[in-house]
Image (cartoon, rainbow, N blue to C red):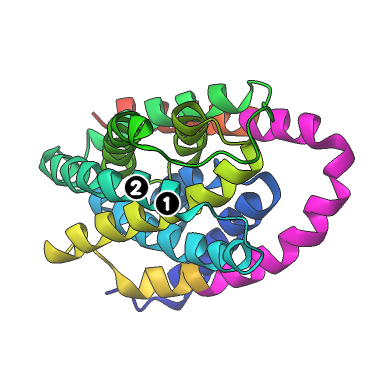
Amino acid sequence: MTTDPVQLALAAASGGLVSLLLTVFGGGGSVLAVPLLLYVVGVREPHVAIGASAAGVALNALTGLVGHARDGRVKWPCALTFAGFGVLGALVGSSLAKRVDGQSLPIFFAAAMAVVGAAMLRPARSQGDVAARIDPRMTPGLAASGVGVGAASGFFGIGGGFLIVPGLMAATGMTLAAAQAASLVSVAAFGATTSLNYAASGLIDWAIVGAMTLGGVGGAIAGRPLAARLADRAALARTLFASLILIVAAYVATRAVGAA
């Protein structure tokens, strides 16, 4: 377990940055957690970085979920069905990732970051049925989508919100706002499943997780007023953020190939 105060301070700062980005943009920020842990905090083992990222993502999602649940924005039947099937995928995905050589994981992660960045460049859609409810005909679609997204989330140790939201919208017809609220149930469930799977193999540095969580509280607080200021320029801000993710993806790929 890490005891170096410099590393813990860097982990707190990284957690704050990821949480701020999640608060401002509502998704995509968690994909930066692993590169920050590897190349800023100095975590040497990619598996440990993924395990810590998954735990931090789960805790951040739970924090956000409380507010949405209090305001009655979470469609629980849809959210729990998607998450329930997705947990199985997250268990399979994280188990598979543990079997992959640690030095190869950053290459896969760079590819995932490129997909996230490209997805964020697409215009967000707000169409949907405000009164959407789950019915038996939706269950197979929710199940298949949940398992697939959960597997990707577990393999990469990310929240997967950029996949969960469109998956929920496609399967249930709910609005973007409703899908974003419901997605936090899955993000928390997938992150918890992945982190516990890694913890069972001794691949979680809880000191790093704790530092990231503390930093995340500050990042969430700082992100709320910033989100309000960027409301009128959301499209431009989202494009800039997506571009940053693509740049970091290129950096991670370069480092990974150089180390191979």
Q: Residue at x 44, y 29 (%)?
A: 171
Q: Nearer the viewer, residue 47 or 133?
A: 133
Q: Secondary structure at mark 1?
A: helix
Residue ID for mark 1: 77
The reply to whether the magenta stretch includes residue 24 is no
Task: Classify the position of the C terminus by image quarter.
Answer: top left
State how far apart marks 1 and 2 are (Cα): 6 Å
Amino acid at pointer 1: Pro
Q: Residues within 10 Å of mark 1 (few under 14, many from 20)?
A: few
- Which secondary structure class fits the magenta region best? helix
Q: Nearer the viewer, residue 186 or 49?
A: 186
Q: Is residue 40 left or right of residue 258?
A: right
Q: Secondary structure at mark 2?
A: helix
Residue 205: x percent and y percent? 29, 68
**The label number, if any, that marks residue 81 in the structure image:** 2
- Quarter of the figure with residue 208: bottom left
**The label number, if any, that marks residue 245 in the structure image:** none
Q: How many marks?
A: 2
| Magenta stretch in the rendered image | 214-242
Q: Residue at x 60, y 51 (%)?
A: 22
Q: Is residue 42 visible?
A: no
Q: Tell me if label 1 and label 2 are in contact, CB under 8 Å.
A: yes
Q: Is residue 208 visible?
A: yes
Q: Nearer the viewer, residue 211 or 117?
A: 117
